[in-house]
Structure formats: structure tokens, C-alpha cells
Image: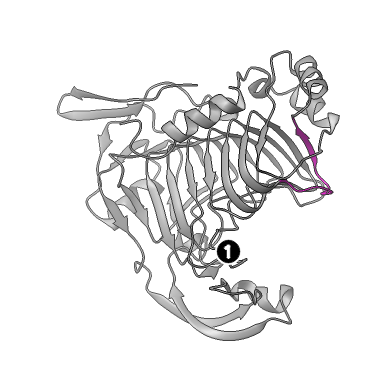
Amino acid sequence: MVTWVFTTLALGGASLVHAIGTPLGFGSSTTGGGSAAAATPTSNAQLASWLSDSTARTIVLTSMFDFTNYYGTKSGKICKPWTCSPNPQVAIDQNSWCENYQPSAATGTASWYVSGTGYSYSLKVGSKKTLLGKGSSAGIKGIGLLIQNADNVIIQNIVISDINPQFVWGGDAITIVGSTHVWIDHNYIKNVGRQFIVTGYDPAKAVTISNNIFDGRATYSAVCNGKHYWVALFTGTSDTITFAQNYIYQTSGRGPHVGGTSGYTQYVHLVNNYYVSVGGHAIDSQVGAVTLAEGNYFNTVATPSVSGSAGNEYFLQSSSELSACASALGRTCQSNTLTSSGSVSRANSAVLSALGAQSAVRSYSPMTASAAATYVQANAGVGKIN
């Protein structure tokens, strides 16, 4: 485990603010905006400009920037794929999704905010950017971040919330596509229409997602249980992602969903996360997935890992699995803990062979699942590192 603090130095009237240390795992060499002097935007337009430009920056938010109505509203066709009760999500007919994938669903019309509904209506984040929040209530509302074709990005200690939560295709909180060296750390994400975090088809490489709170409590849900279904989706051609020390609660699916496209491969290390009150499934390794799950704590999780899916997954539990893992990785591995949760039987040895070739996984020193549960509950989310 690593302790993170903010350091502020006065230098010729400028303020230098940065995270001390390095992220764990695949994203360990991420530097973001480096030593760029910190500055705080004074308007939504200035924040959008600073994030997207080609200048190395450290951007510090001291309040909530509300982009909900930044691009206005739109009315159009929706469909209703889920007929459960109460409060099912509905789907915006984006790119004829309703006709192509839900042709039998009832349809209607509705109005929604345009912010967040596509790449053109997201906050674009360029290379060499560090976005930091001060305190526990700074962040962005009503819009997500798009990290596309960028290198070196840090997003730390911000809240992202309230992006068209009633609507599937209403918006993702963080999108990483065709980008390298990305660290998503100590954030609090809630109440969005689609994914909390998603990668596109172009690879997301050298990515670490750590110490975040994914709050799935929702008024609108795809399965009508008050729990958000769309946690994380990793689908890139050759993603390399460490998903560590996150707090995932009151969700019902995709925690994360890995893979799904033949010919693509995603190398994902799920380690030391704490899952609690998951009403559906957590891990879903589909075709292309190479997923190692170790040292995670599952507390009241209906289905910790989807069985029978086409992806490769090694979910550590038994002493023989621990021994095989230690032999392949050359280090101590940690078993997952299941408490009041469903059973799992997934131990595809191909995962150990593939990830044994990845130094980010070989050199990792995981906590026990019990220690991780204690650590994550005390340290994940905003307001803990400043």
C-alpha cells in the first residue's frame, strides 16, 4: 500500500501541487502534467480549454463545475428494453441502437441533457495533464471525461456525478481510448447513465485505476433493484490495466466486464478491491480477457464472477491455485475472500502464463483480502489525500 499526499510549494508566486509517489501496477510510470505549476480555472469554458489544449498542466478544482446544461437539451426517441419495476432505465436511440438491438422494445419520446451523450459532448483531456480536486466536494457534474489519443494523464480526488442517470447512452464518467500512462485515483463516481469507466476499441495501455469509490446507489436501474449495472467495461485491442484498491458497492453488473471482441486481448489485474452489496455479478471475463483476480474481498455479492463465459480468468482461492500463481509470477499471491457471496470456480492457467510475462503483475505486492477490505474502506475516495 502507498500513502499519497499533496505537496504545495511557493515558487515565484506560483503554486506547485502534485501527488507524491507513483501509482501501482501497469500505470506506475504515469507523471501527468509533471512539474507544471498549479492553476484553478474560473469558468467551465476555461476548464474545458485547459484540459484539451497541448500545454502540460496541473489543474486544481476547488469547487463543483456543473456542465449539466452546458450543451442544452435534446428531445428524441427512446426505447424501453427493461420492463421491471420500479424505475427501469430507458435507452436513448443513439446510432439506431433501439432498432438494431432492441427491436421488440416499447418506444417513446423523452428529453435529456446533451452533455455527456457522446465524445463531442464530453470534456476532452489532452496529454500531460493532472486534474486534482481539493477537499471532498470538488469535481465535475453532468458531463464525463474523454481521454483519447493522450499520454500521461492523472485524474485524482474529484467527484464525477449526475450524467443523465435515467438514460442508457446518457453518458460515461471516464472514457479512456487509444491512450497510455493514465492514472485514475481516489475519485468518487456516482449517478451516471452508462459506465463509470470504459475503454474504447483502441488500446488503453499502462493504466491504473485505484482507490476510487464506485457508488452504485441509483434511482434508475437497468434491473430495477436500485443498483447501478454499468460499472466498468474494458474492450480495447490490447488494454493493460491494473484495477486496485477500489470500493465497489450497491452495483449489479460489469464490475468489470472485460473483453467481448474476438481478436482483441485485455490484460487486467484485479487486486485488493472491496466489493459489497452487489445484487448481480462483479467480474465478467468474456472473449479476449486475460484476468487475474487476487486479494479481493467479496461481501454479499450474488455472483463474484460469471461462470461459463468465454474469457480467460484466474480467480485465486485454493492452496493449489496459490502455489501455481506463486510459481508463475515468482512472488506471493493472495486468495480472494467470499463472505455471504456466491461460489466461483475459474482457474485458467493460461492467465498465469500470460501475466507472468508482465513486470507490472510480477512485481506487484498484494495485501491479503482481509487487509485490503480494511484499507479500502478507510482510504478510498475523495478527501483522503489532501
Q: Is residue 48 magenta?
A: no
Question: In the displayed structure, would residue 146 be above or below residue 60?
Answer: below
Furthest residue toward left: 13
Q: What is the x, y in percent for residue 382?
A: 37, 40
Give the residue at x 60% y 58%: 229
Image position, residue 138 (x, y; %): 30, 47
Camera-nearest residue between 120 and 369: 369
Q: Position of residue 209 (x, y in %)?
A: 53, 37
Q: Quadrant of residue 383?
A: top left
For this orientation, the residue located farthest to the front is 340
Q: Quadrant of residue 352?
A: top right
- Colour convention of the picture: one colour
Q: Residue at x 36, y 65 (%)?
A: 68
Please tell me whether residue 3 is drawn above or below residue 347 in the rendered image.
above
Give the labeled residue for mark 1: 225
Q: Residue at x 66, y 73 (%)?
A: 97
Q: Please tell me which residue is depicted at 35% across the width and 62% down the height of the picture.
A: 67
Of residues 24 and 366, which is closer to you in this image?
366
Q: Is residue 288 left or right of residue 128?
A: right
Secondary element at image label 1: loop
Q: What range is drawn magenta here?
A: 304-316
Q: Is residue 315 magenta?
A: yes
Image side of residue 3 versus residue 281, left or right: left
Q: Is residue 263 left or right of residue 196?
A: right
Residue type at tag 1: Asn
In the rendered image, residue 332, in percent from the top left (x then y), is placed at: 69, 15
Q: Quadrant of the C terminus?
A: top left
Q: Residues within 10 Å of mark 1 (few under 14, many from 20)?
A: many
